[in-house]
Image: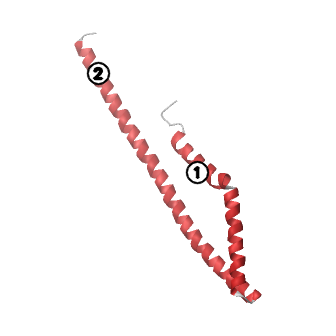
Amino acid sequence: MNEIDYKKLFTEARNHFSLEWDYTKLTAVEKLAVLLSATAFVAVVIIICTFALHYLFSTLITVLAEAMGCTWGANLVAVGILLVLLLVVFAFKKQLIVNPIARFVSKLFLKPEDHEQ
């Protein structure tokens, strides 16, 4: 090979690495966008569920207060239900929270690309 072939080889290699770097940046941006949109979606769902739970428990307290004849007892029952719900979530946090998030992130970042075979 002469000097011209080395220059052409170097230029082609530089172009290849430049294209690979651009592809890597685009893939990272795409996956980050998916991750951020999923995070925003979950945040909105949590906010809506929080409001729904608040109104549900307000209604429960009102109904229990009328049935029991005392507001503080109805509030204690509602707090007890919430504590039981909290304990259930804490007991099953791996199945309810950790595993789904790990599965989502691993599928997002470790899935085989279409161009690789």
Question: Looking at numbered disc 2 in the image, what kind of residue is underneath it?
Answer: Phe
Q: Quadrant of residue 22?
A: top left
Question: Which residue is at the front of the view, 13 or 99?
Answer: 99
Question: Looking at numbered disc 1 in the image, what kind of residue is underneath it?
Answer: Ile
Circle 2 Cα neighbour tier, 10 Å, few/some/many (<14 / 14–19 / ≥20): few
Question: Which residue is at the front of the view, 103 or 19?
Answer: 103
Give the alpha-carbon distance from disc 2 to disc 1, as whole Å. Answer: 43 Å
Residue at left 61%, top 51%? 98
Residue at left 76%, top 87%? 68
Q: Which mark is residue 10?
A: 2
Residue closest to the far top: 1
- Position of 110 relative to 72 (above/below): above
Residue at left 64%, top 80%? 58
Q: Where is mark 1, residue-wise? A: 101
Q: Secondary structure at mark 2?
A: helix
Position of residue 81 measured from the top left corner of the image (x, y, whole percent)? 71, 71
Disc with the residue nearer the chain's start (2 vs 1):
2
- Position of 60 relative to 113 (above/below): below
Position of residue 94 measured from the top left corner of the image (x, y, whole percent)? 66, 51
Circle 1 Cα neighbour tier, 10 Å, few/some/many (<14 / 14–19 / ≥20): few
Residue at left 71%, top 61%? 88
Q: The N terminus is located in which quarter?
A: top left
- Position of 84 relative to 22 (above/below): below
Locate residue 101 relative to residue 22 in the image: left or right: right
